Image: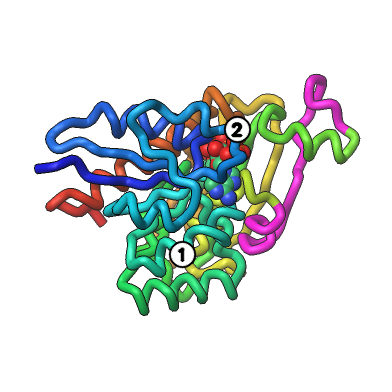
Amino acid sequence: MSRRRIALIGFGSIAGDLAPALLARTAPGYELGVLLPPESESRVRVPEGCALLADCEELRAFGPEIVVEAAGHEAVRKSVPQCLALGLPVLISSIGALHDEALFAGLVKTAKASGGRILLPSGALGGVDYVRAVRDATSLALRYESHKPPAAWREELVKRGHDPATLAEPVTLFRGNAREAAATYPLNLNVAAALALAGPGFEKVEVAVICDPAARGNSHAITVDCEYGTMRTEITNAPSPSNPKTSWIVSRSLLAAIEQYFSPVMML
Ligand SMILES: NC(=O)C1=CN([C@@H]2O[C@H](COP(=O)(O)OP(=O)(O)OC[C@H]3O[C@@H](n4cnc5c(N)ncnc54)[C@H](OP(=O)(O)O)[C@@H]3O)[C@@H](O)[C@H]2O)C=CC1
Ligand SMILES: O=C([O-])CC(=O)C(=O)O
């Protein structure tokens, strides 16, 4: 069997972690193409043997079986519609971009018309399967709390007049619903959007974002209360060595999702 072809969009901390893990797989293994704009500084990091793709026309010619976006909200707006229009499945990391109702509806319409699929990974989270199962509960209360250290929030702290290096007390950066959270913090609140889409929708997820100098990592607490039961999950992820905003586990979540996609056995 020939190697499976995957197109990655972006080559930052997540894709840069994912690519070597995919390239190390055998039987049949993976062949990678990487979509990056011609002027992107990330191009120099793409390993030899991977095809560099400048646009969606080159991506089409590469012939991937699946596309994996790990580039940011802008890439979801620009490149994902074209990939879906080619009838391809697209695994989207930047789920927060889907807070934009018109964008999301357009992607769904394109996928339906072309046979493409929008695939959403659990990313930095766990427990998304439970949230999906209780999504129709009549008494559902779903809360999400993010605790990350100052390294993940440098610019936001400085804007508020705090010195990230000497912050002594936790600072609450945000309280609101998942739609506002994903729109306000595109680099840190994709997980809130994942919960919204798995669960009861963007308006019905209560979000709190706390920058905590005592945080040991990027921690995500999910609380579910409803007639079917309760769930309390707290996950503390190690930050990616190359991007403190992103949890290291995210590349592993994408790897698991890709392997699930090609597997004859599917855990849902
Ligand atoms: N679902 C989840 O749990 C999580 C999702 N995320 C999402 O994943 C995204 C990537 O994270 P991470 O790898 O840490 O980010 P990085 O900033 O490390 O990398 C982003 C990469 O995407 C490239 N890029 C930017 N815009 C485009 C574009 N329009 N088309 C193609 N490539 C582009 C950048 O290239 P250049 O060098 O040119 O800038 C860079 O290679 C985040 O922006 C976030 O939206 C992140 C964490 C968790
Ligand atoms: O990686 C994380 O811990 C979460 C994150 O940045 C996001 O949801 O965008």
Q: Residue furthest right?
A: 161
In the displayed image of the protein, which residue is found farthest to the left? 1
Residue type at the position of mark 1: Gln
Question: Element at badge 1?
Answer: helix
Closer to us: 114 or 171: 114
Residue 100, horizontal then vertical, whole percent: 61, 68
In the shown orientation, is residue 186 left or right of residue 68? right
Name the amino acid, label 2: Glu
Distance (Cα) linking label 2 and label 1: 23 Å
**Nearer-the-camera pick, 40 or 4:** 40
- Residue 82 image label: 1
Q: Classify mark 2: residues with Cα within 10 Å, few (<14), some (14-19) or many (20+).
A: few
Q: Position of residue 220 (x, y in %)?
A: 54, 42
| Rendered view: 201 above or below 159 | below
Q: SS class of the residue under badge 2?
A: helix
- The residue beneath circle 2 is 41
**Would the CB of label 2 be found within 8 Å of ligand 1?**
yes
Name above or below for residue 183 compared with residue 1: below
First to last magenta residue range: 162-184
